[in-house]
């Protein structure tokens, strides 16, 4: 039996997710990620800027980071493609993140309401292209 390729982000608590603005400027945000072997899920607010950017341009880069999005020197940076999962299609992403992050993931909609933010979420499915480049 062939084993699936493993990536450093398979076990990461946070990854820096880079999306691209309309003018091509890279924007990086730390996110929780669940998945393995080059296919990952993120759950985020439907009104977030990263969702707006992904509607225009599905290219992404991901790398293991800390909670502030800081990437360790020399950490591999992976390129990939993101696909937005909306409505019922988002459920696999929500379940994957809940399994990995437990109670904290279940509390996110409650915290969003307390901050008067929309609790509406979308899933993001990220598929890596394969090879990584080395970070700075």
Image: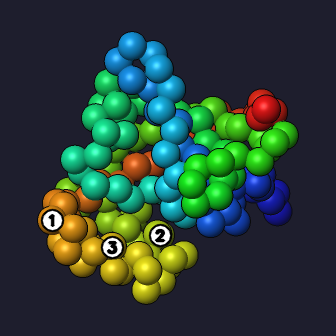
Element at badge 1? Answer: loop
Q: Is residue 108 left or right of residue 5?
A: left
Determine the residue positioned at 34% across, 31% down. Answer: 53
Q: Are marks 1 and 3 in contact (CB under 8 Å)?
A: no
Q: CA distance from mark 2 to mark 1?
A: 25 Å
Residue 79: where, in percent of width, then height?
63, 32
Q: Quadrant of the image for the C terminus?
A: top right
Q: Are marks 2 and 1 in contact (CB under 8 Å)?
A: no
Q: Can residue 1 be seen in this snapshot? A: yes
Residue under label 3, please give it: 108
Q: Is residue 127 above or below residue 95?
A: above
Residue 84: where, in percent of width, then height?
34, 44
Quadrant assignment, res 119: bottom left
Q: Considering only order in the chain, which callout, 1 or 2, is on the residue closer to the N terminus?
A: 2
Residue under label 2, please give it: 96
Q: Residues within 10 Å of mark 2 (few under 14, many from 20)?
A: some
Which mark lies nearer to you, 1 or 3? 1
Q: Is residue 120 left or right of residue 61?
A: left
Element at badge 3? Answer: helix
Q: CA distance from mark 1 to mark 3?
A: 12 Å
């Amino acid at each position: 039996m062939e084993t699936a390729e493993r990536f450093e982000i398979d076990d990461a608590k946070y990854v820096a997710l880079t999306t691209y603005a309309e003018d091509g400027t890279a924007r990086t945000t730390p996110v929780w990620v669940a998945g393995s072997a080059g296919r990952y899920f993120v759950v985020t607010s439907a009104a977030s800027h990263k969702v707006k950017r992904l509607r225009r341009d599905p290219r992404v880069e991901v790398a293991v980071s800390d909670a502030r999005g800081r990437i360790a020197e020399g950490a591999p940076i992976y390129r990939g493609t993101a696909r937005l999962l909306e409505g019922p299609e988002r459920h696999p992403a929500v379940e994957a993140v809940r399994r990995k992050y437990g109670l904290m993931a279940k509390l996110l909609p409650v915290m969003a309401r307390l901050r008067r933010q929309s609790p509406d979420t979308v899933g993001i499915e990220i598929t890596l292209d394969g090879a990584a480049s080395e970070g700075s």
